[in-house]
Image (cartoon, rainbow, N blue to C red):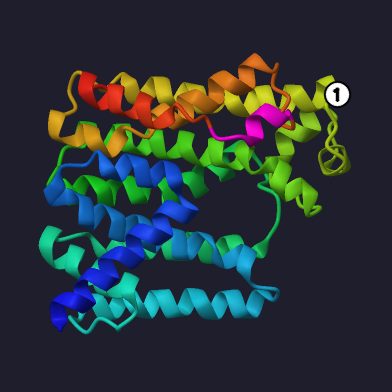
Amino acid sequence: MASVESRHNEKYCLDIVRSRDYDGFVSSLLMPEEARRSSLAVRAFNVELAQVKDSVSQKAIGLMRMQFWKTVVEDIYRDEPSLQPVSAELWRAVRKNYLTKRWLLRIVSEREKDMEDRAYRNLQELEAYSENTQSSLLYLLLESLGVKDVHADHAASHIGKAQGIVTCLRATPYHSSRRKVYLPMDICILHGASQEDFIRGSREQNVRDVVYDIASQAHVHLQHARSFSKNVPATALPAFFQTVVLEDYLQRVRRVDFDVFHPSLQKRNPLIPIHLYIRSWKRTY
């Protein structure tokens, strides 16, 4: 009976990651078998938190959900996991890989702060959010792989920041359609682009200049991450294969001259799984 429940929990995590974080799902499939289940549990936890903001109509309800997940983490480290599938799988991952509680709580706390639902004041604020969410996720994936290495941590920090910035750009058309803009205000002001410009899907040069500046910063973080590659242990590489996805988006947005609303950017690149496999075969990130 326990094994049936365990298989159900594993499948639940796999399904939620595949439907809500397809790029992360494909990346997880390239993890070594012994780390795959833990990595899917960590990604499923992240997905559960990420979807709270868009799935509630009132901030108070969102904050209650965040409190639920804080309690879930505390209970896991007391060895009293709830029966919720992600909680059960995360408990298994924590016991198997000695995952650091601080990284899990940091993701919850940062997502909780994000319930304020406002634009980032500046690029540094977006980077701090990305460090606390995406980089924390990567630190947990490294732990799932049994990697404790300062160079890998430095690379993870920069890749996480790049991931957060790219995610913010990718989501801009969706957010704009709901009359919401989260792009850093300092860069918008610098180029004289208003929130209304984004809400109406403007493709004017000043809007493209905002996107160029933000995308350039993501590219800088990817370059920084790669500057550590000679010192990053090979066992850490599977945690970083998602750089393929970031690189793909940055290349595609450059090809359309930084028009973030271009229809081609709304489609997933069907070759991503193949590119990920090639990257894993080359053992680089």
For disc 1, the marked residue is 204
The answer to whether 267 appears left or right of 57 in the picture is: left
Above or below, comparing residue 80 to residue 283 in the picture: below
Residue at screen point 69% across, 18% down: 256
Q: Position of residue 258 (x, y in %)?
A: 69, 22
**Total numbered circles:** 1
Residue 248 point in image, percent of width and height: 49, 24
- Residue nearest the viewer, comparing 268 with 195: 268
- Residue 71 place in picture, x, y as percent: 37, 80
Left or right, 96 with respect to 5, comes to left
Residue range in magenta is 262-268
In the visual, does 252 lie left or right of 178?
Answer: left
Q: Quadrant of the C terminus?
A: top left
Which element is circle 1 on?
loop
**In this rendering, would 40 be left or right of 262?**
left
- Nearest the viewer among 223 and 6 is 6
In x, y percent, where is residue 60? 64, 79
Number of residues whose C-alpha sits closer than 10 Å to that of mark 1, classed few (under 14), some (14–19) or many (20 or more): few
Residue 282 lies in the magenta stretch? no
The residue lying toward the viewer, choosing from 45 and 12, is 12
Amino acid carrying label 1: it is Glu
Question: Is residue 275 shown above or below 113?
Answer: above
Q: Residue at x 20, y 73 (%)?
A: 6
Pick the front one: 273 or 119: 273
Q: Quadrant of residue 147?
A: top left
Quadrant of the frame with the N terminus:
bottom left
Residue 202 appearing in the image: yes
Q: Toward which corner of the image does residue 48 lie, by quadrant?
A: bottom left
Res 285 seen here? no
**Residue at 45% of width from left, 31% of height from top?**
245
* On screen, residue 243 above or below 282: below
